[in-house]
Image: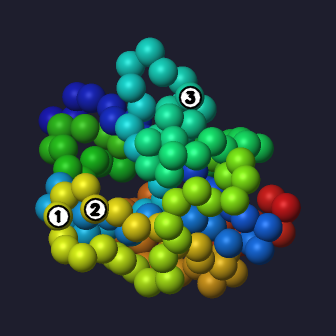
Amino acid sequence: MINQFIIRVYGLILNKQQEVLVTDEYQLNTPMTKFPGGGLEFGEGPIDCLRREIWEECNQEITGIKHFYTTDYFQQALFYENAQLISIYYTAQLNGAPQFRISTKAFDFPEQTNGNQSFRWIPVDQLNPDDFTFPIDKHVAFLLKSSINQIR
């Protein structure tokens, strides 16, 4: 029985070359490709959550934050049997050049250990929703690719 919400907040971090930042991670004993971001904490607003998550993952501030999409259909959380997942996505830019390592290949870390993470830029016009692990990210990748000309 679904009896709780899990709220996640993600950044569609775009650069001037119309590329979006994606993260390849190994978490919960699972390899995953997703947009950077994470869980909303009690007492925190969604934009504060996004700023905190990007700082924790990238050690960098973001600017130009604009709402892009909030889940508008039912999605059961994949890792929790009794929870509904709501995801909020914002477009943003890094404040300055990346201060973290950018990879050119997926899962660019030595071993599949929980907590390992690598980042890469993908041209928005080359996004393939099937390259993402989670259903809402797949949907958002499609929406972003479809609307990139309206965002810029």
Q: Which type of secondary structure does the marked residue at label 3 adopt?
A: helix
> Is the residue marked by circle 2 packed among few (<14), some (14-19), or many (20+) residues within 10 Å?
some
Q: In the displayed structure, does residue 109 sit left or right of residue 123?
A: left
Which of 96 and 149 lies nearest the eye of the viewer? 96
Task: Name the residue located 20 percent from the left edge and 50 percent from the top edge.
Answer: 79
Question: Visible in this render: residue 47?
Answer: yes
Q: Are marks 2 and 3 in contact (CB under 8 Å)?
A: no
Marking on residue 48: 3
Q: Residue at left 27%, top 29%? A: 4
Nearer the viewer's eye, disc 3 or disc 1?
Answer: 1
Residue 45: percent from the left, percent from the top? 54, 24
Residue depicted at x 51% and y 41%: 55
Seen in the picture, residue 6 relative to 104 is either above or below; the reply is above
Q: 77 left or right of 127?
A: left
Amino acid on which the number 1 mark rests in the picture: Thr
- Spot occupied by residue 56 in the image (x, y as percentages of width and height): 44, 42
Q: Which residue is mark 2?
A: 116
Q: Position of residue 38 (x, y in %)?
A: 41, 44
Contact, mark 2 vs mark 1 (Cβ under 8 Å)? yes
Residue 106 falls in which quadrant of the image? bottom left
* Residue 113: assigned label: 1
Numbered disc total: 3
Give the mark nearer the N terminus: 3 vs 1.
3
Q: How is the image coloured?
A: rainbow
